[in-house]
């Protein structure tokens, strides 16, 4: 199949969805959930404003109370949270859009003040990350985690399955499992955080086991055509390292090829930072191991996106921060119009300001 004519503005068939373009809104944490970690009507407005994207991926949403690591991030485990998300999916679908929920468990990137009963966060191993989280409206060092017991892992996998069922019940078109950026599933994958000596630690196969069990459970629940995955093979985000990521991720993609999730979403380089942090890592080797849809992310502009699509190195391109300040990013890219800059002071927390009040191009020009 020839990819050479593909551009950002060509349609793409993703599972049983037809995307009108190949521009994806990446997941972006905004810390604006209300009481009970329930999204608000403002959230529905925010995503509906951006529904011209080929696909929207929500901010990461925790699969359980223990999965939370930052203040005011939404969940997907309670009836109230499902009801809140229904208003979002309806608004997006009414605006002609398509939307996946990104589901996460942060693992050790949390704080005792956010954990049920003030307990320690869980992780593959009891190693505190040298990083901060956002609690009580400020950035604070993360807490010391405890290692998950082997007996707790089946319930953890089950919580992902339930989250997938809840995602579909909330009206989403699918789910993206978050296994990137130093959160729990990524912590199990990479040997800088995973020092276990049981079936979930040590070898590449063992460190990949939890993620593959989660993917199999979710796919069994809602189908491969609604199940996707995000990875960040070389990102140092949240103090995560691996001594030899190439064989790890080569193996992982080979196993995912057997499960056939609808897309794999890959952060190239350091999340939100330089693309060349690991110049020897071969992303193309991963791409060649996967026959399904490949979504590339990190620092893309229109020129780079079109080149990567034309070369067949990706099928979809995810844009993050440009979507925050440019609700009509698709139209701006199509017109080669200037992009509004993000107001960094309003990224995390707050209300409508810096969230739903960025103007569209015709408004900005008026």
Image (cartoon, rainbow, N blue to C red):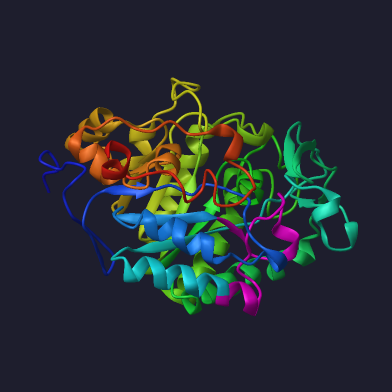
Image coordinates for residue 98, horizontal then vertical, percent: 34, 63
Q: Residue at the location (83% across, 44% down)? A: 126
**On the image, which quarter does residue 365 sit in?**
top left
Residue 150 occupies quadrant: bottom right
* Magenta stretch holds residue 71: yes
Q: Which residues are magenta?
A: 60-83
128 falls in the magenta region = no
Residue 349 can be seen in this image: yes
Camera-nearest residue between 303 and 211: 303
Q: Position of residue 147 (x, y in %)?
A: 81, 51
Residue 331, quarter of the rendered image: top left
Question: Whole-percent x and y of residue 50?
Answer: 36, 53
Side (left or right) of 282 relative to 272: left
* Residue drawn at x 83%, y 47% as measured from the top left: 145
Height in image: 351 above or below 329?
Answer: below
Residue 224 appears in view = no
Residue at image x 40%, y 43%? 323
Vertical relation: 48 (above or below) 27: below
Task: Give the number of marks.
Answer: 0
Residue 71 place in picture, x, y as percent: 72, 51
Q: Residue furthest front?
A: 366
Apparent side of residue 299 relative to residue 309 in the rendered image (left or right): right
Q: Residue at x 79, y 46 (%)?
A: 136
Q: 77 or 363, which lies in front?
A: 363
């Amino acid at each position: 199949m020839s990819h050479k004519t593909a551009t950002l503005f060509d349609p793409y068939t993703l599972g049983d969805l037809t995307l009108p373009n190949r521009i994806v809104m990446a997941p972006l944490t905004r810390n604006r959930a209300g009481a009970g970690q329930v999204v608000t009507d403002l959230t529905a407005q925010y995503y509906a404003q951006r529904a011209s994207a080929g696909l929207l991926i929500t901010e990461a949403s925790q699969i359980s109370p223990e999965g939370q690591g930052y203040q005011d991030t939404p969940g997907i485990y309670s009836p109230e949270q499902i009801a809140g998300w229904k208003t979002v999916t309806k608004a997006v679908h009414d605006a002609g859009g398509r939307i996946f929920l990104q589901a996460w468990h942060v693992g050790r990137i949390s704080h005792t003040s956010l954990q049920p009963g003030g307990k320690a966060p869980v992780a593959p191993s009891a190693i505190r990350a040298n990083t901060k989280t956002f609690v009580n409206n400020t950035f604070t060092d993360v807490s010391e985690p405890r290692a998950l017991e082997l007996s707790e892992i089946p319930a953890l996998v089950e919580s992902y399955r339930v989250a997938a069922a809840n995602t579909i019940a909330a009206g989403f078109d699918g789910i993206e499992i978050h296994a990137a950026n130093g959160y729990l599933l990524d912590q199990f994958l990479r040997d800088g955080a995973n020092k276990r000596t049981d079936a979930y630690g040590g070898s590449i196969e063992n460190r990949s086991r939890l993620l593959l069990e989660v993917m199999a459970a979710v796919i069994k629940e809602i189908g491969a055509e609604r199940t996707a995955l995000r990875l960040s093979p070389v990102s140092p985000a949240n103090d995560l390292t691996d001594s030899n990521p190439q064989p790890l991720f080569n193996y992982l993609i080979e196993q995912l090829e057997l499960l056939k999730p609808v897309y794999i979403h890959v952060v190239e380089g350091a999340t939100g930072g330089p693309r060349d942090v690991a110049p020897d890592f071969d992303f193309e080797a991963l791409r060649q191991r996967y026959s399904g849809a490949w979504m590339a992310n990190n620092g893309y502009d229109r020129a780079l996106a079109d080149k990567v699509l034309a070369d067949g190195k990706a099928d979809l391109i995810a844009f993050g921060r440009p979507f925050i300040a440019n609700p009509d990013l698709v139209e701006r890219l199509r017109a080669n119009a200037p992009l509004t800059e993000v107001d960094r002071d309003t990224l995390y927390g707050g209300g409508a300001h810096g969230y739903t009040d960025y103007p569209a191009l015709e408004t900005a020009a008026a």
